[in-house]
Image (cartoon, rainbow, N blue to C red):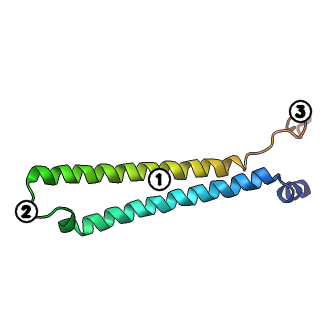
Amino acid sequence: MKQKIKRWIFEPISQKLGRYVGLTVFLVGVALLLFTFFTAYKMFLNINDVLPLGSKIDEMVGRIVLLLLLLLAMGLVSSVIALRGADLFAATHQKIIADKPGESDKTDDNN
């Protein structure tokens, strides 16, 4: 237990930096996802502003497809950013297998 606390206090600065960068990237990705869903909500709430009633049907369909593809791309990019941030954050929490080369975790089995 004491060794765990010691490792936590005296961890390398690169590991601390990686943790904070990963968390920041994850939060930016989540913020972008929220922005995407808010934009979609606002767009479908004011559908008459997006698609005027006097438009031709082919223009309306083209505009709808274009807007949906834009929202899909925004959601995909923001979720990938959030995933990369989560991966970076998780990578800083990986267990160190051995302190010295050639040493591995030993169990307390009496074989």
- Mark 3 Cα within 10 Å, few/some/many (few <14, many 20+)? few
Residue wearing tag 2: 54
**Which mark identifies residue 78?**
1
- Name which of mark 3 and mark 1 comes first in the sequence: 1
**Gap in Å between the C-alphas at discs 1 and 2?**
34 Å
Residue in the image at 47% along x and 53% along y:
78
Q: Quadrant of residue 47?
A: bottom left
Kindly check if marks 3 and 2 are in contact, taking CB atoms under 8 A apart as contact.
no
In the image, taking residue 87 as reference, residue 33 lies left or right, namely left
Residue in the image at 35% along x and 50% along y:
72
Query: Which quarter of the image is occupied by the C terminus?
Result: top right
Residue in the image at 91% along x and 58% along y:
2
Q: Secondary structure at mark 1?
A: helix
Foreground tag (3 vs 2): 2
Residue type at mark 2 is: Gly
Residue wearing tag 3: 101
Residue type at mark 3 is: Pro
Please state the horizontal and vertical placement of residue 14, each as a whole percent of the image: 77, 50
Q: Secondary structure at mark 2?
A: loop
Please state the horizontal and vertical placement of residue 92, each as a whole percent of the image: 72, 49
Please state the horizontal and vertical placement of residue 73, each as a whole percent of the image: 38, 48
Residue in the image at 20% along x and 67% along y:
49
Kindly check if marks 1 and 2 are in contact, taking CB atoms under 8 A apart as contact.
no
**Gap in Å between the C-alphas at discs 3 and 2?**
74 Å
Foreground tag (1 vs 2): 2
Q: Secondary structure at mark 3?
A: loop
**Which mark identifies residue 43?**
none
